[in-house]
Image (spheres, grey):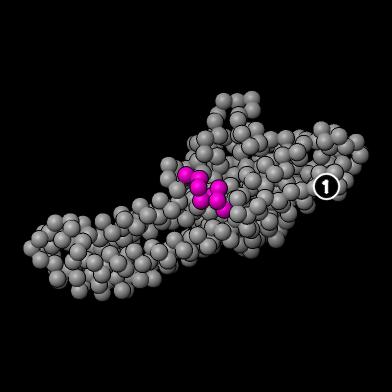
Amino acid sequence: MKTANEKLLDELIGHEVDLTHLSNAQVVEIIKILNSQDAELRAALIEEIDGIGPDLSESAVALALAGVLGINRAVFARVRQALTQSTDDLIRYELSFVHSALHAVLPALVQDQFPVKSADFGSVQSAARALPFQGRLISEWLAGIESGRAASIRDAVRAGVVDGKHAAEIVRSIMGTRAERYADGVLQKSRRDLESVVRSAVSSAAEVASDKVFEANSVLISHVEWISILDSRTTVMCRIRDRLPYTLGTYKPIGHKIPWLAGPGRLHFCCRSSKWPVLKSAKELGITDAEAMALMDGQSPQQTTFGEWLERQPAARQDRILGPERGKLMRQGKLKLQDFYNDKGNFLRLDELRDRLL
């Protein structure tokens, strides 16, 4: 029989996978908004480049490109609105999930004496918006991408005019080419930067929400442990912190010297680390019921890799994470989790996987 801590760890790891999928979906939606006015931007560029005179100072070119830069401001207003709404929705979801997860694993006898508490949405929302990420608020990162994109467009136009390029050539250098799926244009950098900010906004908001729920239930929680199961492939910073214990609320190291710093989900851009609360033992809570003591032994489950965790999960969860065919291949023992990725850490296509089986 699994203990409450083992059940909770399983649920939180599965939830982190779901958050990764959610982050992917949010990136797609936000980038779609950013790209939605590309046709209008292209048309405005063609028209306004032709109107640029001999004065190529920054202010003169910016004035000549007023329509283009206005389109840029408008699309980023929509991006900010969409990201704000999606972040608020995520906070509500995360508060509900963490509360439900604690409620599901704690014995009824324990909850009778120590009911699971919720955290207030408004306070979490305010905390998430006021918490700097890598030295800036998320809103400030968005403003920086917007201004950087405008400057890149302006500078590309100035450079093109100086080099004697035709308007069509300049526009192509900014927008990119269809053959390269527009990834070779000046605008591609803003897409990559925005993707990083969206992923970071998702992870940061989720961590703030879980912080507040765990802190509200501190009477039940011994400490928290850093989880880098999903982030251990790429970052040394997160790998060294995997399963290290920290105090709840103050987040001081317990038995080691590795600092919490910004915390999981915020330590670096696109951080996929998280944390989980180690529940106190029933004995620590003053409960001597034999069943409750067996379920709540206060012990942290043994360290595990994501692949090992995934192999222990039900088929439905494996299929949801990997897809039905990949899940079946893993259950049949034909391929391990690492076999589904190339040397860059990207998912292989199904036809590439089949080639490995030949």
Is 292 on the left or on the right of 200, as rendered?
A: right
Q: Is residue 91 left or right of residue 286?
A: left
Residue at 88% of width from left, 37% of height from top? 287
Query: Residue 142: x percent and y percent?
Result: 40, 55
Image quarter for residue 158? Answer: bottom left
Q: Is residue 127 magenta?
A: yes
Question: Quick one: which residue is furthest to the left in this view?
Answer: 54
Who is closer to the viewer here, 63 or 312? 63
**Looking at the image, residue 53 lies above or below residue 259:** below
Residue named by callout 1? 111
Q: Quick check: is 207 in the magenta stretch?
A: no
Q: Which residues are magenta?
A: 125-132
Identify which residue, 124 or 188, lies in the foreground. Answer: 124
Which residue is located at x 34 percent, y 57 percent? 146
Q: Nearer the viewer, residue 127 or 358?
A: 127
| Total count of labels | 1
Q: Quadrant of the C terminus?
A: bottom right
Whether residue 17 is visible, yes or no, is no
Q: Is residue 127 left or right of residue 287?
A: left
| Relative height, residue 332 to residue 309 (above, below) | below
State which quadrant residue 72 falls in. Answer: bottom left
**Which residue does the image show at 15% across and 61% down from the upper left?**
60
- Amino acid carrying label 1: it is Gln
107 and 87: which is toward the camera: 87
Q: Would residue 259 be seen by someone viewing this image from the given angle?
A: yes
Left/right placement of residue 310 relative to residue 148 reads right
